[in-house]
């Protein structure tokens, strides 16, 4: 039975396989074929241990598709890794295995793929919202530069001043476009919410909007 630790990077992974008094180290591409080739000779896998991180999702999906048991370590709590004097990919992968062997692996909960996808969608919405804020701030700057004083920035008002400069005109059109993109993402989140098993429970809780509580539960 093999115990496997994998240190994940954007373009490659470093894997260590321990089993039957043997240890195999292999660096492989962080691609679907690379991950599949790494595990192709392992018939009896106890578990694969990876660290939670921004590049771990595609690796986790591949392992799930291969029906491989996975444990995900919390990198902040994996003190043997975070406080290592000499930090290398090999030591990181080996530390994951060693922590698991002695029962000290700080495990992170792995939500279902459905929940992870909804989380990703909700977090993505924040991206166009940030862009909208930046556009509004720039519009305020351009209006002030033209000595146009406005307390409340509305689409109706911008319609009347958009032809003052090409910058204001372009920013106004960008603002309308990003508003529509945010609306589309919001509609998709609402669809996911209505199809989610928790929505019926959330709808019975008074004092808070259903979508706000849904965002909170997905964290």
Image: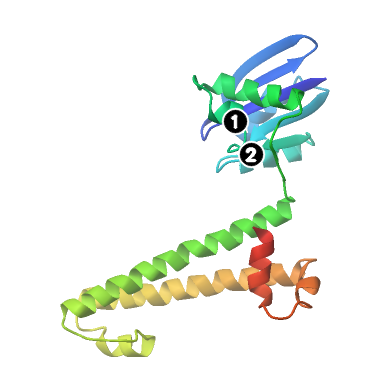
Image quarter hosting the N terminus:
top right
Q: CA distance from mark 2 to mark 1?
A: 10 Å
Left or right: where 91 falls relative to 155: right
**Circle 2 sits in a helix, a strand or a loop, which is it?**
loop
User: In x, y percent, where is residue 152?
Assistant: 34, 86
| Of the pair 67 and 109, the residue shown nearer to us | 109
| Residue 52 in the image, given as x and y percentages of width and height | 62, 40
Q: Depth check: 144 or 185 in front?
A: 144
Q: Residue at x 70, y 12 (%)?
A: 23
Please determine whether, in this image, residue 145 is positioned above or below residue 43.
below
Q: Say whether residue 29 is visible.
A: no
What percent of the width, then of the height, locates residue 200?
80, 73
Circle 1 sits on which residue?
79
Classify residue 143 as left or right of residue 137. left
Q: Comparing marks 2 and 1, which lies closer to the viewer? A: 1
Which quadrant of the figure has residue 196?
Answer: bottom right
Q: Is residue 86 left or right of residue 39?
A: left
Task: Relative to 161, say whether 80 is above or below.
Answer: above
Provide residue 165's location: percent of width, then percent of height.
Answer: 19, 78
Q: Which mark is residue 74?
A: 2
Residue depicted at 73% across the width and 80% down the height:
206
Can the viewer see residue 173? yes
Q: Is residue 130 left or right of residue 193?
A: left
């Amino acid at each position: 039975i093999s115990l496997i630790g994998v240190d994940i990077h954007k373009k490659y992974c470093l894997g260590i396989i321990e089993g039957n008094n043997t240890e195999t180290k292999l660096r492989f591409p962080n691609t679907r074929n690379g991950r599949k080739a790494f595990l192709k000779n392992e018939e009896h896998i106890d578990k694969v241990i990876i660290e939670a991180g921004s590049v771990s999702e595609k690796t986790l999906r591949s392992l799930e598709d291969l029906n491989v048991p996975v444990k995900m370590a919390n990198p902040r709590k994996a003190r043997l890794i975070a406080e290592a004097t000499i930090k290398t990919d090999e030591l990181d992968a080996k530390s994951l295995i060693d922590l698991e062997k002695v029962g000290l692996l700080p495990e992170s909960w792995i939500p279902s793929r459905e929940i992870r996808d909804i989380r990703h969608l909700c977090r993505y919405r924040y991206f166009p919202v940030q862009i909208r804020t930046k556009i509004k701030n720039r519009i305020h700057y351009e209006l002030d530069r033209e000595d146009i004083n406005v307390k409340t920035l509305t689409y109706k008002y911008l319609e009347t001043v958009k032809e003052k400069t090409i910058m204001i005109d372009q920013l106004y059109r960008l603002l309308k476009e990003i508003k529509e993109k945010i609306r589309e993402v919001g509609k998709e989140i609402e669809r996911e919410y209505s199809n989610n098993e928790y929505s019926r429970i959330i709808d019975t809780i008074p004092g808070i909007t259903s979508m706000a509580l849904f965002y909170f539960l997905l964290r």
